[in-house]
Amino acid sequence: MREFKANKISAKIFFSPNEARFEEKVRNFQGCPTIAISKNGRIFAGWYSGGRCEPHMENYNLLVYSDDEGKTWSKPVVVIESSKEDLIHALDIQLWIDKDGRLHVFWVQNNTVVAPTELPKFEKGQPGVIKDGYLFDDFVHAEWEMVCENPDMDELVFSKPRCWGNGFLRCKPNYLNNGDILFFNYNQTKDRYGYSISCDNGQTFEYAYGPEKIATYFDECMAYQKQNGEVRTFARSYLGKIVEFSSFDNGRTWTDAKLSDIVASDTRFYVAKTPSNKVLLIKNNHEKQRSHMTALLSDDDGVTWKYEMLIDERNDISYPDVDFYGDKIYLVYDRERSGKDSAKEILFTSFTEEDIIKGKHPTSVQIISKP
């Protein structure tokens, strides 16, 4: 049996690198962005790039920031690169600001091997592929992080990389009413939704499983806690609608999963409580296509979605991530991740709850990065 090294050996970390291979103009793939905003309003964005596609052993994650509300962006201040020497693949950065104002930079790692001459057979739904001489057949992932204690400093300082558990974290964590933190770092090898709970502000984690999965290859769960304490969780599916399930004891036990009536394509969405205690949902408002990026707002804890605003109707847009600052909602997403004539755009925009209520997006969508 092959040794699982992805939870023992960190990917290669570069701070403010000057290497030509990380320059924007040479990128042939980029997507899956994430956003986080510091206490003083510095906007951080990260995404997954490198190589010609995903997965690829030239993939890397990168982190940039803006001090002028997204008008201009820094060069990469951190790059987390796959290691061909250690056969470690680095993917899917996720950013989060905790209640103490610290910036968490999460990323995923898995093992690869040099591709055999005889190709293996993969079952439907398994992410096993061969790309440019490397076999990506490992469905077990490790979750890593670095923490920046003061993300508003001129010179950013990060903790040493640490692996805090197995799994695949692709969405922001949640603080629960009892102070625990809920992380949906899912397990692709299991038929139940996996998650972690930390009772000590992210120092240690307890891993557990919720209900049986429904029609998904990539769980990508997100949750919000209702006023009655219910932790309502949404999950990705390929049936044209979001799956949902709930916990009434802060994530210790769960209801069975069921298909909701919320239309969405098979890709990541974003759901969370806003600072005003409404519920924000951003999704591709189409059963099949990654198009019609739409913001929905609920003022009754998600029973109904009374307010709706179309953000972007174009095809091949996906993976929204959000953070809040002041009265604004800041959003990143991607467009046409790879391909010879694709856009390869990381996009950014902002709006308010009032804009969603009025149903009209007031500002243009900006490009953070485009090769």
Image (cartoon, rainbow, N blue to C red):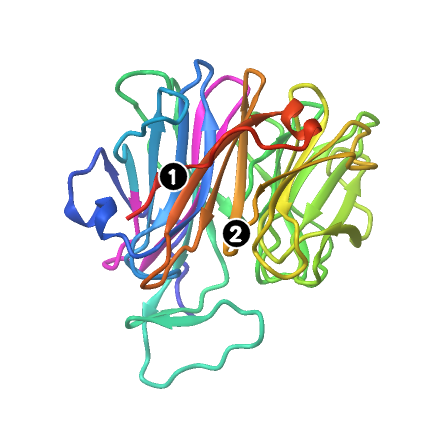
Residue type beneath disc 2: Arg
Percent x, y for residue 62? 33, 41
Question: 85 left or right of 103?
Answer: left
Toward the viewer: 6 or 24?
A: 24
**Magenta-tinted stretch:** 80-105
Asked where in the image residue 115 lies, by quadrant, the reply is: bottom left
> Visible in this render: residue 202?
no
- In the displayed orientation, state which residue is furthest to the bottom: 118
Please, what secondary structure does the residue beneath circle 1 have?
Answer: strand
Toward the viewer: 166 or 313?
A: 313
Kindly identify which numbered label has been placed on residue 320: none
Tag 2 residue: 314
Q: Is residue 335 above or below residue 139?
A: above
Please, what secondary structure does the residue beneath circle 2 have?
Answer: loop
Percent x, y for residue 341? 33, 61
Question: 101 left or right of 289?
Answer: left
Percent x, y for residue 22? 22, 46
Toward the viewer: 24 or 212?
A: 24
> Visible in this render: residue 122?
yes
Q: Residue at x 27, y 17 (%)?
A: 154
Does the stretch in magenta take in 95? yes
Q: Residues within 10 Å of mark 1 (few under 14, many from 20)?
A: some
Q: Is residue 288 above or below residue 196?
A: below
Residue type beneath disc 1: Ile
Asked where in the image residue 215 lies, by quadrant, the reply is: bottom right
Counting residues from the start of the chain, the first of labels 2 and 1 encountered is 2
Percent x, y for residue 144? 42, 42
Q: Is residue 300 above or below residue 79?
A: above
Camera-near label (2 vs 1) is 2
Does the stretch in magenta take in 251? no
Q: Residue at x 52, y 56 (%)?
A: 315
Tag 1 residue: 367
